[in-house]
Image: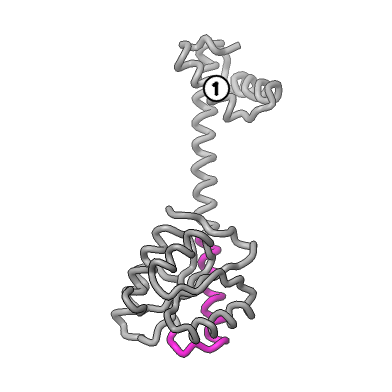
Amino acid sequence: MGKKTEPAGEIKSALIVEDDTLVGMGLRSYLEELGFNVVGQASDADQALQLMRDKGPNLVLMDIRLDDTDGVELAAQMLGECRCAIVIVSAYSDPELVARAVAAGVFGYLIKPVSKDALAAQVHVAMQRWQEQEQLIKDKQELTQTLETRKLVDRAKGILMKRLNLDEPAAHRWLQVESQKRRISMPNIAAKLIESEKLLGGGGID
């Protein structure tokens, strides 16, 4: 996946993609009242992508029809590069546009003119969904890392059991002792042992 934004719980940042300056100013005012740091307002796709890459906002308010840009297509492109909550802000509510926005993966859809209360409610829901998604991604990454670590340690224990004629608990204790003695983590000890086995045929165990 693309670039990660600020973790949940840190300063909330927002990008406005809107080619009407006055509408953008109104949205900025509302967002700032909601506690967001507005990192910029883009009026076209190039500006929006550059600001997103430079600033990594948590939230993007996206006009659906810019001068030369389809806002839904731009939203899909941005979501492919950056994990953020995109909310469409549009004067159009026809079902085809809404369906395209949903398919693109946006977190909300607001109809202009946008009131402060409507924006606050939609942003709250969007940010909650974004934070839940971020937590799921983090949990998945941690689970994958845990499984990889377990595989690494199990493989190292297998080498020790074969080379030193140890049972599984003794091999595990060997790794623990070496980890403490050398002041490096057990997965790193396991990785060094496996690499030594590959390079020296088991001669790296000492």
Q: Residue furthest left?
A: 96
- Rendered residue at 46%/59% (across/down): 82
Badge 1 amino acid: Lys
Left or right of 158 in this view: 67: left
Residue 193's x, y, as percent?
Answer: 54, 20
Residue 4's x, y, as percent?
Answer: 51, 55
Residue 107's x, y, as percent?
Answer: 45, 71
> Does the magenta-highlighted stretch encompass residue 126?
yes
- Residue placed under numbered mark 1 in the picture: 192
Please tell me whether mark 1 sits on a helix, a strand or a loop: helix
Circle 1 packing at 10 Å, graded few (<14), some (14-19), many (20+), is some
Q: Is residue 70 visible?
A: yes
Quarter where residue 63 is shown? bottom left
Residues rendered magenta in the picture: 111-133
Quarter where residue 112 is shown? bottom left
Question: Could you tell me which quadrant the C terminus lies in?
Answer: top right
| Above or below 3: residue 204 | above
> Does the magenta-highlighted stretch encompass residue 125?
yes
- Rendered residue at 44%/80% (across/down): 89
Q: Is residue 87 visible?
A: no
| Above or below 25: residue 86 | above
Nearest the viewer among 158 and 23 is 23
Left or right of 202 in this view: 106: left
Quarter where residue 175 is shown? top right
- Rendered residue at 46%/15% (across/down): 199
Left or right of 85 in this view: 73: left
Nearest the viewer among 103 and 152 is 103
| Above or below 96: residue 86 | above
Q: Main secondary structure of the magenta part?
A: helix
- Rendered residue at 48%/63% (across/down): 52
